[in-house]
Amino acid sequence: MRIRRMLDLSQDLYHNCPGTPDFDPPKLDYLAIGPRDGWKLERLTFTLHSGTHMDAPSHRNEFRTNLDEIPVERFQGKALYIPLAPAKQAGEPITPDDLAPYADRMDGETIVLLYTGWGEKRAWTTEWIDQSPFVNNEAARFLVRQGVRGVAIDHFSVGGTGDENEETHRILLGADIWIAEGLQLDCPELAEGDWHLFALPIKVRESSGAPARIVAVQYD
């Protein structure tokens, strides 16, 4: 079996890149500069939930499983691409009705990719920060009932920034469904054929989350 195509679904992590406004953005310092020092060496200071990243159950205080404690084989699975853009409007919830047409393709090896179009809007704007479509509590419960392995979205928060966000995280993480946020999902080819997803977070001891390189692979 050979790889036919591979898609990088990760956003860039860089100095002052957009993210949740609750914390300082990433800061990049150059400790050594090639022409001057003979080496190039950078220091990046950021929260572990910056850029394209994954949430572990311990992201919510009442749950104890850290990201480094999840077996590595659970960071891969069948990609299920659900294109919600452009029909899904700003601030509109993603509901069970949006997910139900794909229910027969969901099982314990499925990683659901929710394309809202907000990955392309990534910027320090009110629209990008506060007006993304989001998974509401009922949709989160629907995904739990389907027994999916992971849920990924192209915004820094799967539950948006409104009142339902905390409970949406609690529902998914409490069912041992990992969450990936901040992806780039403007990839219509993901709707064509079978794709396998690999989401590999940095291995940080006892972490509630970590940046990840997330790629989709299609085999011959």
Image (cartoon, rainbow, N blue to C red):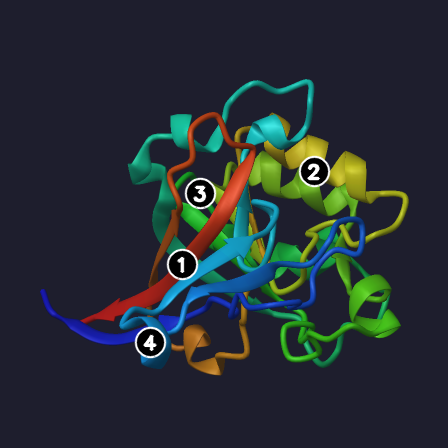
First of labels 3, 2 by sequence position: 3
31 relative to 74 in the view: left or right: right
Instruction: Measure the alpha-carbon separation of dots 2 and 4.
Output: 43 Å
Identify residue type, mark 3: Asp
Q: In this rendering, is residue 16 above or below 171?
A: below
Residue that appears at 40% across and 25% down: 69
Q: Residue at x 51, y 56 (%)?
A: 44
In front: mark 3 or mark 2? 2
- Looking at the picture, how far across and down is residue 17, in whole percent? 64, 68
Label 2 SS:
helix
Disc on res. 107: 3
Q: Quadrant of the C terminus?
A: bottom left
Label number found at residue 34: 4
Label 1: which secondary element? strand
Residue 58 pos. (x, y %)? 59, 26
Q: Seen from this angle, which residue lies furthest front?
A: 36
Quarter the N terminus occupies? bottom left
Query: Which residue is depicted at the point 66% across and 42% down?
Result: 142
> Could you give the CA–CA distance between mark 4 and mark 1, rounded to whole angstroms?
26 Å
Q: Earlier in the sequence, mark 2 or mark 1?
A: 2
**As rendered, which of 77 and 34 lies closer to the eye?**
34
| Residue 63 figure quarter | top right
In the rendered image of this protein, does residue 189 appear above or below residue 108? below
Checking the image for residue 213, the label placed there is 1
> Local crowd at mark 3 within 10 Å, few (<14), some, or many (≥20)?
some
Q: Which mark is residue 169?
A: 2
